[in-house]
Image (cartoon, rainbow, N blue to C red):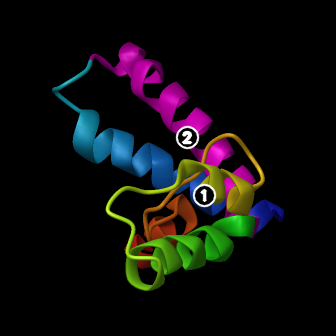
Amino acid sequence: MNQSVHNKSISFIWSIADDCLRDVYVRGKYRDVILPMVVLRRLDALLEPTKEAVLEELVFQKEEAKFTEWDENGLRQASGYVFYNTSQWTITILIIKNA
């Protein structure tokens, strides 16, 4: 991530904090919300390279294999981790859409 993208991401996070957390949290308590969001972003960044593979596996399970419940082993294998994300959204996409 280059410095410009990094700064834009930080500005976006703090603008959300100012817009959404003002009057809900005391300014000193923003970290109670921001820190979990940073952890979520880190997990999202790990899953980003295999996102398409996970979504393709999900489509396969739903449409071709007609599974009524997801086969978690297939999704884990597609992600390369013991966790996966089946949402179409990533934090990067949300940042770009809201920029």
Above/below status of 56 relative to 83: below
Extreme-bottom residue of the structure: 64
SS at mark 2 in the image: helix
* Residue 59 covered by magenta stretch: no
Q: Which residue matches tag 2?
A: 40
Picture coordinates of residue 52 (x, y %)?
63, 77
Picture coordinates of residue 96 (x, y %)?
50, 75
Above/below status of 35 relative to 53: above
Dot 2, crowdedness within 10 Å: few (<14), some or many (≥20)? few
Extreme-left residue of the structure: 23
Q: Nearer the viewer, residue 65 or 74?
A: 65
The residue at 24%/42% (across/down) is 20
Picture coordinates of residue 45 (x, y %)?
69, 54
Q: Quadrant of residue 50?
A: bottom right
Say what amino acid the circle numbered 2 marks.
Leu
Q: Which residue matches tag 1?
A: 75
Residue 31 horizontal side relative to residue 74, left or right: left
SS at mark 1 in the image: helix
Tag shown at residue 57: none
Q: Quadrant of residue 75?
A: bottom right
* Residue stretch rendered in magenta on the structure: 26-49
Q: Nearer the viewer, residue 99 or 60?
A: 60
The residue at 48%/48% (across/down) is 13
Dot 1, crowdedness within 10 Å: few (<14), some or many (≥20)? many
The residue at 36%/39% (across/down) is 17
Q: Nearer the viewer, residue 97 or 8?
A: 97
Q: Main secondary structure of the magenta part?
A: helix
Q: Earlier in the sequence, mark 1 or mark 2?
A: 2
Q: Is residue 6 visible?
A: no
Say what amino acid the circle numbered 1 marks.
Leu
For the C terminus, give its image quadrant: bottom left
